Amino acid sequence: MKELIIHDNEAGQRLDKLLRKYLSEAPGSFIYKMLRKKNIVLNGKKATGNEHLRKGDSVKLFLADDTIAKFQAAGKTVEENIKNTVKLDVIYEDQNVIFINKPSGMLSQKAKETDVSVVENVTAYLLESGQLTKENLQTFRPSICNRLDRNTSGLIVAGKSLAGLQQMGELFKERTLKKYYLCIVKGRITEPAHISGSLVKDEKTNRVSFSNGTSSKEANGLPIETEYLPIAWNQEMTLLKVHLITGRTHQIRAHLAGTGHPLLGDYKYGSKKWNDRYKKEWKIKDQVLHAYQLTMPGMKKELENLSEKTFYAKVPETFWKLIKETAWEHGTQEALEVLH
């Protein structure tokens, strides 16, 4: 027999959802059969699985140890998932959330079983620091609250607790926090702008097309809004600070390319000839796009520590070197001040 006592990270969810995590390799039919036969009970009573758990509840599984082990994946795969992790650049953390500066090249979430993403790196960090145990992973796993493209660097938030994960996820979903990016684009931009339009995604190519129509129905796509402020420029290119109002796939890259200002290093939407030159001369391998700033709204409860705070992620060295050594016609000092 195995007893699970419900703590903060398990409370609030349905019993069957918890059981699907704990017995992650078991088919749903097995779980519901065990509930019907009272081999799994909630607070000593028969349960259907749709009960919402509360802190202090008792879930007992009258199953053989080898049966439980057979249907658990966490204990067998945790070492494999975290063995190739790297040291994280932690910007902020408390008991509920952790903010990191994701390097370019790291996946936000793994696409296949062998991938090592931000999630695996955060899990490894929490295990190594003693904030999480392998047993904890059987009913709760840290996860990210926002996503960045693999080759986009910068601020990414993960939930260390269920409350942190749910509340931060809601902020990103409802867009009540403000997200700012830094990028270098082709061409000279001297005035701030608020641009809108629509994006249509091609699932086969993982590419989106931009329409400057304001109606999503006209473009058969999703409406997007982007604001930008030029920080420094010359005749060839511009350093922009971008406020991402909506958050669609490849929005900044496709939106700016659609207005004639593709990102430096972006081969999917940009200029191959221009990118090749900077790849050779400056070692620019990815799109020069960095999630630089998060500004939080007023917060209460578990996330009160974050209320109205602003967080910054240090610009990658290659990007910073390009900013410092480029001969800008305007804004060199402004560029340095806004980044420090």
Image: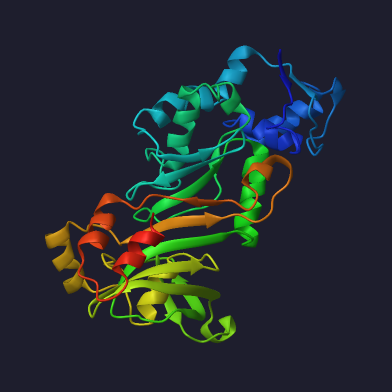
Count of numbered circles on the image? 0
Residue at horizontal 48%, vertical 62%? 180
In percent of width and height, residue 35 lies at: 78, 28
Q: Quadrant of the N terminus?
A: top right
In percent of width and height, residue 160 lies at: 58, 35
Residue at horizontal 16%, vertical 73%? 273
Taking depth in this image into account, of 96 and 60 the one nearest to the observer is 96
Q: Quadrant of the C terminus?
A: bottom left
Judge whether 116 appears above or below 71 on screen: below
In percent of width and height, residue 4 lies at: 71, 21
Q: Can residue 269 be seen in this view?
A: no
Quadrant of the image occupied by residue 34: top right
Q: Is residue 38 visible?
A: yes
Image coloring type: rainbow
Judge whether 7 appears above or below 52 on screen: above
Residue at horizontal 39%, vertical 66%? 204
Taking depth in this image into account, of 210 and 278 the one nearest to the observer is 278
**219 left or right of 327?**
right
**35 left or right of 110?**
right
In percent of width and height, residue 277 lies at: 14, 67
